[in-house]
Image: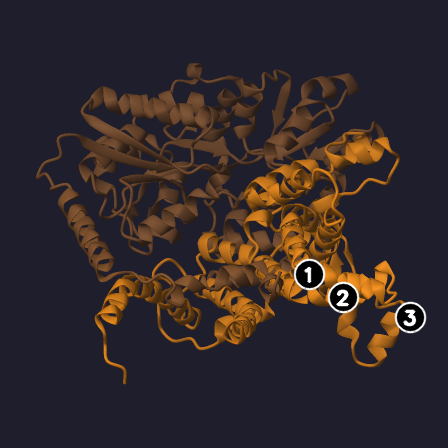
Chain colours: A orange, B brown
Amino acid sequence: MRRLSWDRVIAILLLLPSILAIAIFVYGFIAWSGWVSLSNWDGLRPDLSWAGFVNYAKLFANPRFQIDLRNTVVFTVLFLGACIVLGLGVAILLDQGIRGENFFRSLFLFPMAISFIVTGVTWRWLLAPGDPATGRLTGINVLLNAVGLPLSQWYTDPTVIHIQPTSAVGQFLQQIGLGFLTTPNFGIPLAMFSIVIAATWQMSGYVMAMYLAGLRGIPEEMREAARVDGASEWQVYRHIVFPLLRPVTLSVVIVLGHISLKIFDLVAAMSKKGPGFATDVPAYFMFETTFQGDHYSEGASIAIFLLVTVSLLVVPYLIYSTRREAEV
Amino acid sequence: MTEKATLTPIYRILKVPSHYSQGGVTMSRRTIWSMLSLVVVLALLLVACKPTPTPTPTKKQLEIFSWWTTGGEAAGLLKLFELYNQKFPDVEIINATVAGGAGFEAKPALKARMLGGDPPDSFQVHMGHELIDTWVTTGYMEPLDDLYKQEGWENVFPKGVLEIVSYDGHYWSVPVNIHRANVLWYNKKVFEANGWKPPETFDEFFALAEQMKAKGITPLALGDVGIWASTHLFEVILAGTMGPEKYKGLWTGQTDWNGPEVKQALETMAKMLEYVNPDHSALSWDQANDLVIQGKAGMTIMGDWVDADNLAKGFKDSGWAPPPGTKGIFIALSDTFGLPKGAPHREQAIEWLRICGSKAGQEAFNPLKGSICARNDCNPDLFGPYLKTAMEDWAKDAIVPSLAHGAAASEAWVTKINDVMTAFVTDKDVVKAQAGLAQACKDAGVCK
């Protein structure tokens, strides 16, 4: 064992307060939540008697939670897809050496500086559907109406697109025992698109900035070399640029993915649970269950579920990047 | 541009800059010692700056927690503070408010404070199960029997109210006001121009709704962002379908949630939802009322805080009537104040409750808030035309508790019913909703 030098002792002393604080206020409370989620605590008075996994079983049997899972998947896929396509597209355009690049970069990046609450309230007004039947229109629907496009009910639309059990595909799925795929729980709620629009508006600028940094890191010589070898501009992107941007995409997926899994503020400000839970998310369900319904153990089980899903995403990434750090 | 540039930005943030770890810059021992002594000095300073506790505070305080932050509610609350300070000029009142309709944001904040052992001196809470099931059965409140005796409140509050604020033979809070949940609001001008009358039965309601639809008017304005307005509509339909006694039985387990009346009420509601504005889930109750004010919608079924909203918006052609089937029924809710155990300024809090329940206090507060007195001896001349009629009905109607506003059922139960309503408003599946309601009653421990 190495001798404890003064430097080491002092380093430990200086680190100790923050280690203790993190141990108690982060990991201690995670452990506490885990314990609560396995207890019988229902109502304000803490009751920490052992209940086992009853709360989790109840949770997955709860129709609202099943809808929440669907919503999370739909939101994550759409939000990530939209952000990556838009962010990468804008980054490539800005990378062409246009004039006023600084201005546009700041312009697209600024929405990120706004709180999700502000975004939510603003988009709630913009996407308010009004009542077309009586000609009372508001927000974006006024624009759509002016140019003759069909109007949307936005986040108040209760429609869930799913495979109809009576359709040919639906009947086929039922025959092979996959009939559950034809239920609305495996559909796409249209109201979710409004949330995706607001979230994408806010975060795509950030994705653009990350891709732009990535693009700047690709040496011009490599592209030149490819061009000399006779590659078309598309082939340069397809075989040189996109593969080199892969680490950026991974970071984007991790960062946006964990935002989307635990999203709360945007939904709370914009549409709350939405019509028929069309925009409900687990974090909002947790808030209502715990702090309005006083079902503390059920609420804790949602919290632990969220923690586990986010960890599934983040932990492998951390391991990967620590390894890379060791290599570099 | 080397391999470093291909690292992602996040990765760069996570990576410790090399000159610290690789000894490019090493801190001298002197630097470290001076940093350590700085920490020690700062810590000592913090300890030294801690105010020495004075044995008797020179200024007495009173902290009142509520969600009254806007319009008439805030004005009424300040009026009560004014009365208090006239009597006790040396007490500093701390107005601890958390904004948000129906206390949606305030209640979680209050729970965090109470569970953390930091109760306010007194807090706003809805009369009934919201108070009893959340705070009384869990042992967080002090009974107020002495105060009720000293002030003679048993004689001035109606029996229906005394029943709702008591539990286990004790009184637990002081009601400041009464609101009525079941009111049908309409635009008199629109009704007169078309020769319409407010509907008294559900059949009349639907016949009228058809006529309105033909004229291009949305028959029923609904603003159920946050869903409680739909639960509110449902409670009114429940009471209108089954009458006061059976309605009360729903909350005690005596009326069967699987019975035909509940089914009928759900069917009526499903039909009614065909006549509401399609953007209801984007609007709040006051935005729904705007549609009535503008003549774009015919009616709205909402509590009597609509009256205050109309007055604030300068709308004078407002008409009101009991919704179908609820004539002679007064679905009541009330804001009350209680005394939490461990209130830091208990003595001042008791004086506060005394003012809340007093005639002077209620007569000052309620005309501003747009509600009627919980006491039955207030002077009607202080109140506007709507509130006068409400006072008359309050004196003679059957009083039943409101579901959506905490009087009838515990918050845990209401949360579950809200979930059933959220699904029902969209899918209008009567069978599923009824099963959900029956299950919610079981989960609440009221039904077997």
Three-letter code, disc 3: Ala
Residue tagged 1: A218
The answer to whether tags 2 and 1 share a subunit is yes
Depth check, front residue: B354 or A198: A198
Residue tagged 3: A168
Label 1 to label 3, Cα distance in Å? 49 Å
Report the chain holding disc 3: A
Residue tagged 2: A240
The answer to whether tags 1 and 3 share a subunit is yes
Q: Reply above or below: A325 against A111.
A: below
User: Residue A64 falls in which quadrant of the image?
Assistant: bottom right
Density class for disc 1 (Cα within 10 Å; few <14, some 14-19, many ≥20) is some
Three-letter code, disc 2: Ile
Q: Is residue A140 among what the camera can see?
A: yes
Residue furthest out toward the right: A168
Q: Residue sitting at 39 percent across and 44 percent down?
A: B164
Label 3 to label 2, Cα distance in Å? 43 Å
Q: Is B104 on the left-hand or right-hand side of A189? A: left
Three-letter code, disc 1: Ile
Q: Reply above or below: B275 against B92.
A: below
